Image (cartoon, rainbow, N blue to C red):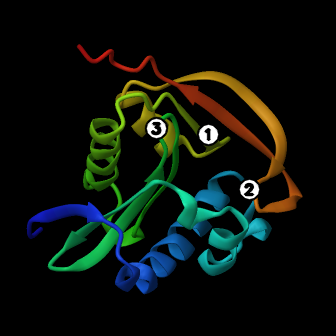
Amino acid sequence: MSELKIRPYSPSDYHYICGIHDAARKIELSFASLDAAFLPFALAAEKENFFEYPHIDVAAVNNAVIAFNAYTEDELAWLYVSPSMMRKGIGRKLVAKALEAEPGIKHIEVLYGNEPARKLYESMGFYVQTTEEGVMPGNERYPVKVYSMCRVPKVQS
């Protein structure tokens, strides 16, 4: 693989992240047996205020975006990798970049059944604090169960 570059989101990345989200989200929902709850990125982003996150990063190879994340000072909220690029360390690099930018990140929710994501976050210092049930954000017609994952942030000196 050519050199991976992680950089801030640009509006010209929009079509890439739509495709990445839509393909990867279907896999994520399948792990949780929630296939029918799929919403395309354009709709999910609007309903969940995606573009209001203070940090949105993309991972690119040869200027083609292959993954993205969105986070705040204490929560990693979105992480999606193009299915053809999954399990190559790209998600891990995006998580590491988020933790470097915001060392206070301590929370993430993972759909129950999405074991690859849970294992990734556990390898990055998160642990399952509780399993919670509610409704899916942005698509409230669907009941959802999530791993509520936490980590103890590193104290900066």
Q: Is residue 113 left or right of residue 124?
A: right
43 or 113: nearer the eye?
Answer: 43
Q: Nearer the viewer's eye, disc 1 or disc 3? A: 3
Q: Nearer the viewer's eye, disc 3 or disc 2? A: 3
Residue at image position (67%, 41%) is 112
Instruction: Please identify the quarter of the rendering in which residue 90 is found.
Output: bottom left
The amino acid pointed to by label 3 is Glu
Label 2 packing within 10 angstroms: few (<14), some (14-19), many (20+): some
Residue at image position (52%, 56%) is 53
Label 3 packing within 10 angstroms: few (<14), some (14-19), many (20+): some
Of the two numbered discs 3 and 2 on the same chain, state the one appearing first in sequence.
Answer: 2
Whole-percent x and y of residue 92? 31, 45
Q: Is residue 87 left or right of residue 147?
A: left
Disc number placed over residue 14 in the picture, else none = none
Q: Is residue 1 left or right of residue 138?
A: left
The amino acid pointed to by label 1 is Glu
Residue at image position (65%, 78%) is 40
Of the two numbered discs 1 and 3 on the same chain, state the one appearing first in sequence.
Answer: 3
Residue behind mark 3: 73
Q: CA distance from mark 1 to mark 3?
A: 15 Å
Q: CA distance from mark 3 to mark 2?
A: 31 Å
Residue behind mark 2: 33
Q: Quadrant of the C terminus?
A: top left
Q: Is residue 60 left or right of residue 129?
A: left
Callout 3: SS: loop
The amino acid pointed to by label 2 is Ser
Whole-percent x and y of residue 101? 30, 41
Asked if residue 87 is positioned above or below residue 156 in the image, the reply reads below
Callout 2: SS: loop
Of the two numbered discs 2 and 1 on the same chain, state the one appearing first in sequence.
Answer: 2
Disc number placed over residue 109 in the picture, else none = 1
Q: CA distance from mark 2 to mark 1?
A: 16 Å
